[in-house]
Image: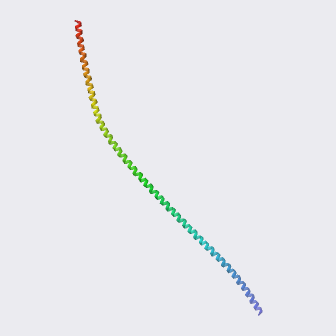
Amino acid sequence: MTMLEQLLDSEAGRLEQELKQQLRYHTVVESENREQLKKEQTLKDKNKIRNEKVEMVKEEKAAKVRTAQAAQNAKREHSRKILKDIKVDHETKCSNFLSHVLETEVRIREFQKSQEGRNFEKSEKWRQKVSNIHKNYELMQENKRLAGEKQLIKKEEKNKTFSR
């Protein structure tokens, strides 16, 4: 029986050592599992933070895009307004120019008509003046001719009186 007791004691010691070894193995595995769980949790937290940062960056980019688009739209509207104002101003200037040209043409025509009237009056006065000059010239010529004839007659009479 002692042998059986020794055999049972050695078997119990071996089982106890095996159990201690399994307990140590189980403890090591459990601590590794805890470490793995911590690593996984840390990785999840990092991924969550990374995803939050990515979302935040996406939102910031979207906000910047919206701001840039709004600024671009405002610039386009401003440019359209300026172009519209320029077009209206150009049309106004063109219409003013055309009205000025028409007014100038009317004034020129009126001036030409008045010039024609004045020129006609001047030419009539000139014709009358020239006519008067011709008449006076003819009168002077006639008077000179008559005076010359009188002198000829006087000279002939003088010559007759001297020749007798």
Residue drawn at x 43%, y 55% is: 81
Count of picture labels: 0
Q: Is residue 75 above or below residue 97?
A: below
Residue drawn at x 41%, y 52% is: 85
Q: Left or right: where does residue 37 sit relative to residue 68? A: right
Residue drawn at x 75%, y 91% is: 5
Seen as rendered, the residue at the extreme right is 2
Q: Quadrant of the C terminus?
A: top left
Q: Is residue 44 above or below residue 83?
A: below
x, y (%) of residue 6? 76, 90
Q: Is residue 37 above or below residue 56?
A: below
Looking at the picture, tell me which residue is in the foreground, 26 or 41: 41
The picture quadrant where one finds residue 132 is: top left
Q: Quadrant of the N terminus?
A: bottom right
Seen as rendered, the residue at the extreme top is 164
Residue drawn at x 27%, y 28% is: 129
Seen as rendered, the residue at the extreme bottom is 1
x, y (%) of residue 46? 60, 70
x, y (%) of residue 24? 70, 80
The picture quadrant where one finds residue 100 is: top left
x, y (%) of residue 10? 75, 87
Image coloring type? rainbow
